[in-house]
Amino acid sequence: MSDPQKTLIRGASPLGGEPRDLLLDGGVIAQTGAGGTLGAAGATVVEADGLILLPGLVDLHTHLREPGREDSETVLTGTRAAAAGGYTAVHAMANTFPVADTAGVVEQVWRLGRESGYCDVQPVGAVTVGLEGKQLAELGAMHDSAAGVRIFSDDGKCVDDAVIMRRALEYVKAFGGVVAQHAQEPRLTEGAQMNEGVVSAELGLGGWPAVAEESVIARDVLLAAHVGSRLHICHVSTAGSVEIIRWAKSKGWDVTAEVTPHHLLLTDELVRSYDPVYKVNPPLRTEEDVLALRAALADGTLDCVATDHAPHPHEDKDCEWGAAAMGMVGLETALSVVQHTMVETGLLDWAGVADRMSSRPAAIGRLRGQGRPLAQGEPANLVLADPAYRGVVDPAGFASRSRNTPYAGRELPGRVTHTFLRGRATVVDGAVV
């Protein structure tokens, strides 16, 4: 990784606007000016004609797997993948081995992130001990630890007990925390393999009904309103879920929600191939759901894009459908998928992308120094992307330790050319350094 140095970004288009120059020095944006107006004495120059400048991306939902599943990913390899995708901060989910349900484990993950130096790692603490849904974890201790945990989630499992969910919401309210729910009613999804619908019926695979997600979201927005606490909904996947969240927001309740890139693009029709790369939780839904999710992200009902980056080793995905693990890697392709599904369709401009992939997730996670304006004096957490680039996704070139991408061999637009973490280049000319 390169050392911090003075860098002049020349002729970039902040948020897709008019070309500007930015001088990065001392970890901040030291100067800005119209294209061609800033001097380059002593600075490394990045010629950025035609490149979009965005604040560094922030992911609310990343599985780094360490400790315990280093065969899938480590904090080092996962943060290198994040940097390659334009991310300067990620939230590391708690379903590790051991589970991140104590101050000791979240501090371990946080320190590994600091040592890696490729992006900020903010641990997510478990809501319940061992993700078992029976007893609240050490929420206060994790918040008060060096890691300063603000988001709590049993992601991978649903907090299905209404009393436990209520108690968690009450507990985190005291310090402004947020509970992030993996909405999946377990009894309704026993044996489920894919979205319940026409395709599951034709293939003879166990169906995963939309109501299993929607019923939990409906319960939890009501609980959050009753308690007066913050609720975040992970990886929303159905049109019905969108309507419930829209209704909750119309009431003024403190509810936020995320959507993954793959749920903005892929549908359950792909499962006809029986390729386990398309097996994911929640499952790929219908075209109607995809269009509803895009519209909801555009109008702000869904606050942000979160990758749900879920790496798995080769043997856990290259097997029969029923035995395969659920999940997809997503950090290195997220911005391209959003460009394809949201920018090129006219649903979002680049300012909207910055809002949904940087500013809003940083605000939800209460991250200081991330998702900030591209202005003088602000931390130099930045990404440059080439929107004109077109390329075929080749997982062999991923920085992630895992290769379970649903986009292998697919052409996607856009490419991250440079990422800066507090002025330090972590990606140069598309390569992690």
Image (cartoon, helix red, strand yellow):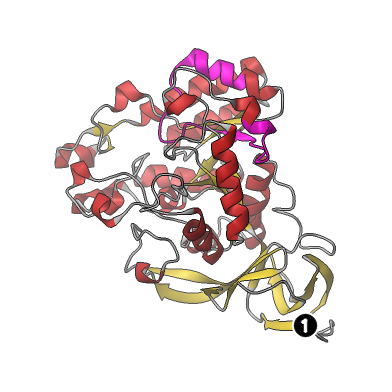
Please identify the quadrant where the N terminus is shown.
Answer: bottom right
Q: Residue furthest top?
A: 163
The amino acid sitting under disc 1 is: Ala
- In screen coordinates, is 395 left or right of 297? left
Residue 81, relative to residue 268: is it above or below? below
Q: Residue at x 70, y 46 (%)?
A: 367
In the rendered image, residue 283, in percent from the top left (x then y), is placed at 34, 41
Mark 1 residue element: loop
In the rendered image, residue 124, in percent from the top left (x then y), is placed at 56, 38
* Residue 115 visible within the image: yes
- Number of numbered labels in the structure image: 1
Tell me, yes or no, whether the highlighted magenta stretch contains residue 143: yes
| Residue closer to the observer: 244 or 193 | 193
| Residue closer to the observer: 302 or 73 | 73
Q: Residue at x 34, y 24 (%)?
A: 186
Q: Which residue is mark 1?
A: 43
Q: Quadrant of residue 108?
A: top right
Q: Quadrant of residue 419?
A: bottom right
Q: Residue at x 74, y 73 (%)?
A: 18
Q: Quadrant of residue 133?
A: top left
Task: Give the residues drawn in magenta, as a range.
Answer: 142-169
In the rendered image, residue 60, in percent from the top left (x then y), is placed at 56, 45
